[in-house]
Amino acid sequence: MGYRLLLIALLLVGALYTLAARRIPMDPWTAAELINAQTLPTLYGGLLILALLVALFRPAATAIQQSARAPAPGGRYLRLAGIGLLVAAFILVLGWLTLWPALGLLLFATAWWLGERRWLPMLALAITVPLAGYLGIELGLGVYLPD
Amino acid sequence: MLEGIFTGFSTAFTMANVGWVLFGCLAGTLIGMLPGLGPITAIALMIPISYSLDPAGGLIMMAGVYYGAVFGGSTSAILINAPGVASTVATSFDGYPMARAGHGGRALAIAAYASFAGGTLGAVALMLFAGYLAALALAFQSPEYTLLLLLALSSVVVFAAPAARLGSLITLLLGLMLGTIGTDQLAGIPRFTFGRLDLADGLNFVLVVMATFALAEAFRMVLQDDPPAMPDVSSGQLRLSVEQTRRLAPVVGRSAAIGFLTGVLPGAGATLASFFAYDVEKRVGDGSREAGVAAPEAANNAASTGSFVPLLTLGIPGSGTTAVLLGVMLSYGLQPGPRLLSEQPEIFWGVIASMYLGNLFLLALNLPLIPVLARLLRVRSTLLIPLIIGFSLVGVYLTTLNGFDLYLMLGLALLALALRWFAFPLAPLLLGFILSGLLEENARRTLFIAESGIDVLLSRPAFLVLAVLLALVWLLPLWQRFSAGRK
């Protein structure tokens, strides 16, 4: 993502946030207060928009940010998208498989997606970490987990 | 005070708490040693474990994680020139060239001894001054707290490098905005919840910490190249001669003093301390590479200890890491600040006493283990990244037991990745998020007091002093620009 694109996306977030802040419902007593439920959110949103406009139109003010990174190779964005999908899939199956089996699958699949092809470390990772979590956290520390 | 110190040591020296400090130091070192993973990530990853302990044990373990991670960070800075956190960047200036010249072990040993000395001197200073400051802070009420919070938030922006100030301000505002999500505490009005009950209590702080630091860091590693190969470290290099020790002792003393005083300032923290001490040493010291490693290490450890002063005595975190610790304390139902000393002295003094233990363990156990621990740096990213992703997701799920929070976490991590990719600092975001509610609550109360006349506020000496300090902090960038223009 380009630097200016990020600033514009943040500007959009700031504008939507400020708009939503102005629409926070209030009763007459709350509305009459000097600092009410809208005041600070509106101030934060307004300041963010201002700061982002300065960043957009005065490039020298964010020289560090602009020179920070060259774009990553295209293939790596694909890898990141895959990781994002795997995490989303983990959250989806969490309710059916319960935490530890879902975690084992996530670890295995993520390692494979990142290019790991050695079966022993992959299996060790996918089995020992969830097992240690189950024994240490659920049984040892008695942390409750929904079935 | 002596009674308090005794209470602290008797709390910290129970078998269980000694074990938790040891565990925390080792876990912190292991995590902090991995490139890119700093103290905030280390603490975030350990939060779920801390919840299963009693408050004193949990906080003592977290303090151990903190020192361990600061210490561990210098190892990757020295060996592979990959400082995981900004506070160890100055260490890499002279540490990495030493490692490339075959003196990596000696650089690590200097870093370890300097860290120990800096941390221990910082703990002594904290023990001497914390009680007095806490007693003074008892007179603080909402008006003073409002100014203190504004001072902490402003300092994060003002003390950043001039070219990074606007970036810090942007992330600080994003954090403050995230902190407004949920039910308004005073009026009971839902804000930015979009009718979802999951958002009624606001964003969980573990979620925000894990998303912005642990998960975003794992995503960054997916996008970036692997770290370079690491030089070998033999255990024979991990000793210092008497002559070297004598030469470095004043360097460590000076740097620890600089570090502690800088760490006490809200927003300044270990990074500023390490650069400041390095710069001072290059100007007034012998300019050797050994001193260049010792100075930032002593300073950043003393600053880490110093940053506990505003947290424990005023309840105001001065850095991202202490902001996370504040969140942990609030989760325990503790209210850090002057009342912590009078109402729960065992926790107040226990955390301080654990600093001695933590520093001792770091030196006694971690130093001999460095050649072994350093092999961790060779762990392939194909195994390390899944581990970080798994730990952060499990950590949030164990805290909230809510799948919706995991989706939020994923979205927030992607935003944090984009910010991190362009070098926006994320510690201000965390500080803003955690202090947002406190600021709003105290600002409203202050204005309520001021309704009966502004002279009520102006008659409070502490309020006036803080107002002047705040004005000075806000004027600092203007003064810097003015003085630069004159040159």
Image (cartoon, rainbow, N blue to C red):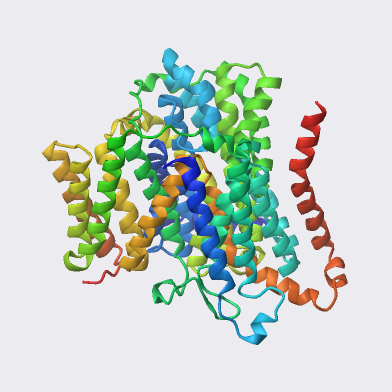
Using the image as rendered, state which of residue B334 and residue A21 is in the foreground: A21
Where residue B305 appears, as percent x and y from the top left, is 59, 45
Where residue A55 appears, as percent x and y from the top left, is 60, 44
Q: Residue at x 20, y 65 (%)?
A: A98
Where residue B15 appears, as percent x and y from the top left, is 41, 55
Quadrant of the frame with the C terminus of chain B: top right
Using the image as rendered, state which of residue A102 and residue B417 is in the foreground: B417
**In the figure, is residue B473 to the left or right of A143?**
right
Residue occupying the far bottom of the picture: A28
Q: Is residue A73 above or below residue A8?
A: above
Q: Residue at x 33, y 61 (%)?
A: B406
Q: Residue at x 70, y 64 (%)?
A: B145
**Is any atom of residue B10 visible in this view?**
no
Q: Is residue B358 above or below residue B243?
A: below
Where residue B429 appears, as percent x and y from the top left, is 53, 53
Using the image as rendered, state which of residue A72 and residue B152 is in the foreground: A72
**Is any atom of residue A19 visible in this view?**
yes
**In the figure, is residue B459 to the left or right of A55?**
right
Q: Is residue B179 above or below residue B22?
A: below
Quadrant of the frame with the N terminus of chain B: bottom right
Quadrant of the image occupied by residue B186: bottom right
Q: Is residue A107 above or below residue A118?
A: below
